[in-house]
Every structure is written in C-alpha cells, then in structure tokens.
C-alpha cells in the first residue's frame, strides 16, 4: 500500500503570540515541524511526505528539512507553499501527492507527538472505510451555552475531540478537496469529506497527541520533548598492519600502516556505532554487521554508522551528543579532527557541534602504546520523547534484536 502524508504547517500561529510561525519554533531536538516530519519519516508504512508551509517559505524550509534530514527518514520529501486557508493549503499539497497513493493522511505540524501506533490505526481505518479521523472521547460533561446560560447538557459519550492525523482513500480526499475548491468552507478535511457525502469513521486518538496552541502548551511541549536520556558506550581495537589504509572517523590519514579488519577498520565509527546501538538496546556492531557476512567485507564504516543511526531513529530515539576518544601512538590526528567530526555528524544526522573527537596516546604502554594497534572509546547520549517507541512490547523488541538476514 502506498501511503502519502500531508503535513499542514502553513499557519501563522497568531494565538501563540510569536513573530515566528509556531511550527518553526524549537521544542528540543528540532522544530515542531521537524518532530512531525521525523514521526512520519521513520514510520515503515509511509511512502511519501508533502509538507505545506506559509507562502514564500517553501524553498527555505525544504533546504532546512533536507539539510537536517533525520537519519530514519526513508520517504520522498516535498515542500509546497500554502494558501490563505487551511483547506487551500491542503489542496495545494494534494496536487503534489503521487498519483499512485492509495491512502493519504493529513496531519497538523503543531501535533509533534503523534505516535506510530496512532498512525497505524488511522491508515488501517482509512483503507477499510474510506475516511477516518483520530479523536478522543470527552471526559467532561459538556454544556451548550446561549447568552451565558446553559441551554442543554449534552451526553459526553457522544462528544469526541478531533485530532490528526486524518486519513482518506485517495478518491475520497480528491472529492473533499474539490468541494473545498468550489467555495465550501470547513475547519478540516474530515468536514469536507462529510460534505461530499462520505462517512468518516473515528479511531481512538491519543491524549498525548496534543496540539500546541498557547504559550503554556509550548512550555509543556519543550519539557516533554526533553524526554528520557539513555547513555551507551562503545569500544574498538584493531592491530595495525602494512598495506592497509588508516581511516579514522571517515577520514583517510597518511600512514604506512592501517587497521586489520573485515571492514575498513575505522575504530572511531565502530566505537560510535556500538555506543548508539547500546544506548538504544539494539545490540552491537557484531550483531548488526557480523564479520562472517560478506556484505560487510571492506565496508565503509561511515555507512555502517549511518545505518545504525537509522535503526536508532526508527526505534524512537535521537542522538543528543557523541564523544569519541581515539588512542593512537602515531601519526598525530589533530589536523584531521574537524573532518572526522563532520563525517560522524553527517552519518548521525546531527549538528557537528554535538560531536566531539579527541586524540590520545597510550604513553608507550601495551600494544597500543608500542604502536602495534589503534583503539577508540565512545560515549553517546540518546533522548526520546515521553512516548513509547513503536516496538516497545517485549515480543517486537526481541524480533528487533534478532540478527539481520
């Protein structure tokens, strides 16, 4: 099934009182928009993402999203300018959705904490029924008020509070968009689908899938985005032999000897890979990229680190920072450290400022100190929102830890 997502980020966020559109405000680890894009981009059932932004900001936003593209993102990514109303913005985005899309989701960028489980429920309901919306049942008694006086008490069992994502089979959303273009006003696409004659089914929403609207919401979101922290350590050591290139952190260092190994023997990348996999509880480099597998013979270790970072992102974590210490008697690596930080940051999909590389010697002690070997230590900090990863249940987690075939 080909599933497209329209992420609506075209509003100005006037109620928040910020000179910057609220979806572009940082809430920790990225903007609201980046969090929303990451949630869908790391979901295995999503094929395509179309982001709609305020008119005139399309090219700039596209550049930012692609430059800071989370390592877990697989789908195609497109950015379009919005219109004067939400429905106009969604219509502009729908015009860019692939013609092969079976289901199209519409999601507000101001709901950055959407979970994979909620995305799954919406996709399944939209495919089965044609149109579906995430919503939560009211917990409070609802009163209808006229001129300051209660006119009626409404049974709360029948009251649901709408959320996003909303999902539609392609032909249903096409009819809804056409109705909106004909002049009918609506607050969301579900209302347009209703107006076009379709029944919209409700799936259980998520109380944590909040929409950030006020300053208080923003403060709470930033506290929540800080999430929980997990720390992992990594270590790698290789003998140095003649005839092998010396590659550290993805940078080739002039040397008459290099590490002996199944891959390129890049100790900085290997230690970093073990650190992030360990922090996420995903095993280690030997489990994920075993030296018995011919696919990894002379493999580029930067590519292995990038793949490990993709696994970590898919499990619901992001890299907060990485600190690597390379232990090598000679040659000195200080002039190559900037390049190493750049390569490591690129593989992890993070800013270079959160990656540190240090060079040390072993003062003549043991094989490393005698110049017979090279080693590296790494420490990585991962953070995750206060929402469970997609595969948090033990059975799924066990399958995730199984060696790749």
Image (spheres, rainbow, N blue to C red):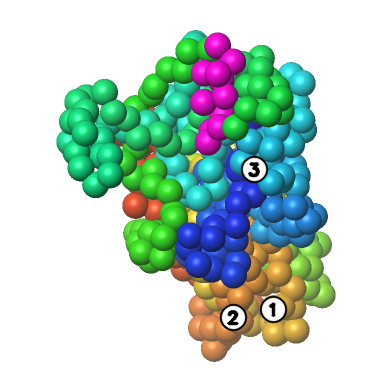
Residue 185 placed where, x, y %? Answer: 60, 32
Residue 316 seen anywhere in this rendered image of the structure: no
Q: Residue at x 71, y 25 (%)?
A: 182
User: Mark 1 vs mark 3: which is more N-terminal?
Assistant: 3
User: Mark 2 vs mark 1: which is more N-terminal?
Assistant: 1
Q: Residue at x 66, y 22 (%)?
A: 179
Looking at the image, how many numbered discs can be counted on the residues?
Answer: 3
The residue where tag 3 is placed is: 85
Disc 1 to disc 3: CB gap under 8 Å: no
Residue 150 placed where, x, y %? Answer: 19, 38
Residue closer to the observer: 191 or 45: 191
Residue 120 versus residue 327 in the image, above or below? above
The residue where tag 1 is placed is: 337
219 lies left or right of 179: left
Please provide the residue range marked out in magenta: 186-197
Between marks 2 and 3 in the image, the one whose residue lies nearer the viewer: 3
What is the distance, in whole Å, between disc 1 and disc 3 at their CAs? 49 Å
Residue 165 versus residue 252 in the image, above or below? above
Residue closer to the observer: 240 or 311: 311
The residue where tag 2 is placed is: 358
């Amino acid at each position: 099934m080909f599933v497209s997502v329209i992420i609506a980020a075209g509003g100005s966020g006037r109620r928040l009182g910020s000179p910057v559109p609220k979806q572009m405000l940082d809430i920790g680890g990225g903007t609201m928009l980046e969090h929303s894009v990451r949630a869908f981009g790391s979901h295995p059932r999503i094929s395509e993402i179309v982001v709609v932004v305020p008119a005139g900001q399309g090219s700039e936003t596209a550049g930012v999203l692609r430059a800071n593209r989370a390592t877990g993102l697989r789908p195609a990514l497109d950015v379009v300018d919005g219109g004067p109303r939400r429905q106009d913005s969604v219509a502009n985005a729908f015009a860019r959705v692939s013609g092969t899309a079976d289901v199209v989701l519409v999601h507000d960028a101001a709901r950055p904490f959407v979970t994979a489980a909620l995305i799954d429920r919406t996709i399944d309901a939209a495919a089965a029924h044609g149109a579906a919306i995430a919503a939560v049942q009211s917990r409070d008694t609802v009163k209808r008020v006229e001129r300051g006086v209660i006119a009626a008490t409404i049974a709360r069992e029948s009251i649901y509070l709408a959320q996003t994502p909303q999902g539609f089979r392609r032909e249903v959303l096409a009819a809804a968009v056409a109705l909106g273009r004909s002049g009918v006003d609506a607050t969301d696409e579900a209302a347009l689908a209703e107006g076009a004659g379709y029944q919209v089914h409700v799936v259980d929403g998520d109380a944590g899938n909040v929409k950030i609207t006020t300053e208080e919401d923003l403060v709470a979101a930033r506290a929540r985005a800080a999430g929980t922290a997990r720390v992992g350590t990594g270590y790698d050591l290789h003998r140095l032999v003649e005839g092998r290139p010396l590659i550290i952190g993805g940078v080739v260092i002039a040397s008459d000897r290099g590490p002996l190994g199944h891959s390129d023997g890049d100790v900085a990348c290997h230690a970093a890979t073990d650190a992030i996999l360990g922090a996420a509880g995903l095993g280690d480099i030997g489990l994920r990229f075993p030296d018995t597998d011919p696919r990894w013979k002379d493999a580029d270790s930067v590519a292995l680190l990038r793949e490990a970072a993709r696994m970590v992102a898919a499990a619901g974590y992001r890299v907060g920072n990485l600190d690597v210490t390379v232990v090598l008697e000679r040659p000195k690596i200080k002039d190559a450290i900037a390049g190493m930080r750049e390569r490591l940051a690129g593989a992890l999909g993070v800013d270079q400022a959160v990656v540190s590389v240090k060079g040390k010697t072993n003062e003549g002690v043991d094989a490393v100190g005698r110049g017979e070997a090279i080693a590296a230590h790494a420490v990585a900090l991962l953070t995750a929102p206060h929402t469970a990863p997609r595969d948090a249940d033990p059975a799924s987690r066990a399958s995730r830890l199984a060696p790749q075939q």
